[in-house]
Amino acid sequence: MTGLSLFAQTGAKQKSNQIIVTNTSALVLKDKPVAISRSKFPGLQEEGLYPVISSSRGTVPAQLDDLDGDNKWDELFFVADLQANRKTVFTVKWVSTKPEYVKRTSARFGKRSAANSPVEPALAETVYEKDMPKSLGFQRYQTDGPSWENDKVGFRHYLDGRNAKDVFGKLIPGMSPEKVGINAKGEVEDNYHVMEKWGRDILAVGNSIGIGGIALLKGNTPLRLGVTVDDAVNNVEKTTFHIVSEGPVRSVLNFTYKNWKPEGHNYNVEETTSIWPGMYAYHNSVKMSGLGQQEDLAIGIVNINAVKKPEVVKVNEKWVALISHERHTYNKEWWLGLALIVPAKSYLGFTEAPKTGKLSTTFLARLKIKNNEPVNYYAVAGWELSDKGFKDPAYFKRYVLSLVKQISAPVNITVK
């Protein structure tokens, strides 16, 4: 493919665009996400073209993401460092060869079809209610399900019916090896609870939903989305998962849960999980249907090793932070700060799950949720070996509050 098929609305051929990003806040923004819809480039018709973005500071890694699965990209995405109260001009040139950049995010998923089959990488999976390890007699999935990471921290989701979210603490900014959770024979193996050069799994999860896992509160009764490791049949009829995008500056995963039937009621749930560089956190968006009048969304912070309740800080009009600085790690070996950043307009306080049961040992942030209306939030994990400052509760709190301010800072985007 030669040449560039980018046309202005006048029909004149253009070789480049300008993107003007204005930081309207008094904060210097680091790795601020910039997402631009394809519709902002009305003259771009041809597939197979890729953006090369540059500013006065040099080349800016970027990617094109197909978010709706129609095999056409929907969004141009990059992260940028932006000076306070200042415009930054980026030039976009469209080329036919996909640029290669250092990876600052990653998504990983592997599965096997039988106990004696090797693990193979995969982009998607469908799980039915009887596909639980207790029924199958073996664990299908590398690291119990998909994992995602950036240059600061990693996370994993238990796709085996538990639907909890765990933490990989990182010692280096590079991506962890693709073979984490697989032994030399290609078998699923829990080999990530020992320290490696990249880091290790660190969070004690148990029957909680980890950090950022979701449930419902019906009145004051917590309803677990899924089951525990001891259950043979799921309470979700069909779970589907796929990696939407894996790129140098953003990775996106999608989970849907069809016919979740706790206590005889029927719900459908979708969550979309995203991560980009520079933050000890991931972003999650949750949408549900089948809700009645008594249900609230619950988002978890595991409290197996907690000795005090989380601190709640209303940071601004947009966001509330729940901050728990404890030895949340295995055997209380290290300090690990955990936090939720939730929308202030939805926040209804927090409660505590029972000490035992299907959903236990978890602080649960309670949020208003309406049918088919997404709720967006962030889950944060700061390990003392990733940043020695995280050993100090005041330091971790300052980090969380600073992250909220970065998230809240408005930017204006113009494409020419």
Image (cartoon, rainbow, N blue to C red):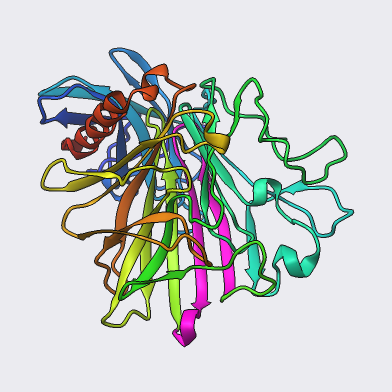
- In the rendered view, does 315 fall on the left or right side of 274? left
Outermost residue, bottom side:
264
Q: Nearer the viewer, residue 412 or 94?
A: 412
Q: Position of residue 83 (x, y in %)?
A: 18, 19
Left or right placement of residue 47 versus residue 190 in this view: left
Tell me residue 11's x, y (percent): 27, 43
What kind of secondary structure does the magenta stretch mostly adopt? strand
**Is residue 245 in the magenta section?**
yes
Q: Residue at the spot x=44%, y=75% of the render?
A: 268
Q: Is residue 115 visible?
A: yes
Instruction: Compare residues 105 and 221 and report the one nearer the observer.
Output: 221
Quadrant in which the C terminus appears: top left
Q: Quadrant of residue 136?
A: bottom right
Residue at position x 57%, y 44% from top?
147
Marks counted in the figure total 0
Looking at the image, which residue is at 70% across and 72% down?
A: 232
Q: Splitting the image into 4 quarters, where does residue 25 fall?
A: top left
Q: Is residue 97 visible?
A: no
Q: Vertically, is 124 above or below 394?
A: below
Q: Which residues are magenta?
A: 237-265
Residue 320 at x, y percent in the picture? 20, 47
Q: Between residue 138 and residue 304, name the one nearer to us.
A: 304
Residue 99 is inside the magenta segment: no
Quarter that holds the N terminus: top right
Q: Is residue 132 left or right of residue 9?
A: right
Horizontal and vertical percent for residue 34?
30, 36
- 244 vs 13, nearest the viewer: 244
